[in-house]
Image (cartoon, grey):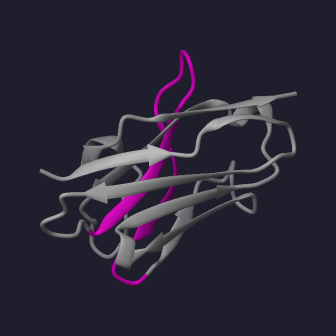
Amino acid sequence: QERLVETGGGSVQAGGSLRLSCAAERVTSKSACMAWFRQAPGKEREVVARIYVFDGTTEYADSVKGRFTVSQDNAKNTMYLQMDSLAPEDTAMYYCAAGDSVGWRCPPNTYLYHTWGQGTQVTVAS
């Protein structure tokens, strides 16, 4: 069964950067979509960025556009999230997920993703 493992979280000052990694293990067939979600205490889980695995098309939440970049290394079955200009409101548990596309797009809905990592904490101090 496929497993996703996130690494790279930590604590950083506002304005700093972090790079998250999501390694897919025991992959038998590639999922069309990989995505990063985050969940802050007391808030719903929200999509941050997603990537259509087969052509690299990416989409971002408005709150992170221009600051976060999602990428992939297909040879390593790994997805990355480069986070720059971090702000305190970016503090959350970050999860990677794998799912199927809807048409040719990767959906923002959590229920459409079938495999989840355990999460990695990102804390941004002001």
| Outermost top residue | 42
76 sits to left or right of 71 = left
Residue 113 visible: no
Which portion, as a residue range, is magenta? 32-55
Residue 95, position as x, y percentages in the image: 44, 41
Q: Nearer the viewer, residue 7 or 42?
A: 7
Quadrant of the drawing holding the C terminus: top right
**Residue at x 25%, y 56% (from the top left corner):** 25
Q: Is residue 34 depicted above or below 117 in this figure?
A: below
**Residue at x 27%, y 73% (from the top left corner):** 103
Q: Is residue 89 depicted above or below 35 in this figure?
A: above
Q: Is residue 49 inside the magenta stretch?
A: yes
- The number of callouts visible is 0
Q: Nearer the viewer, residue 106 or 67?
A: 67
122 sits to left or right of 51 = right
Residue 101, position as x, y percentages in the image: 28, 66
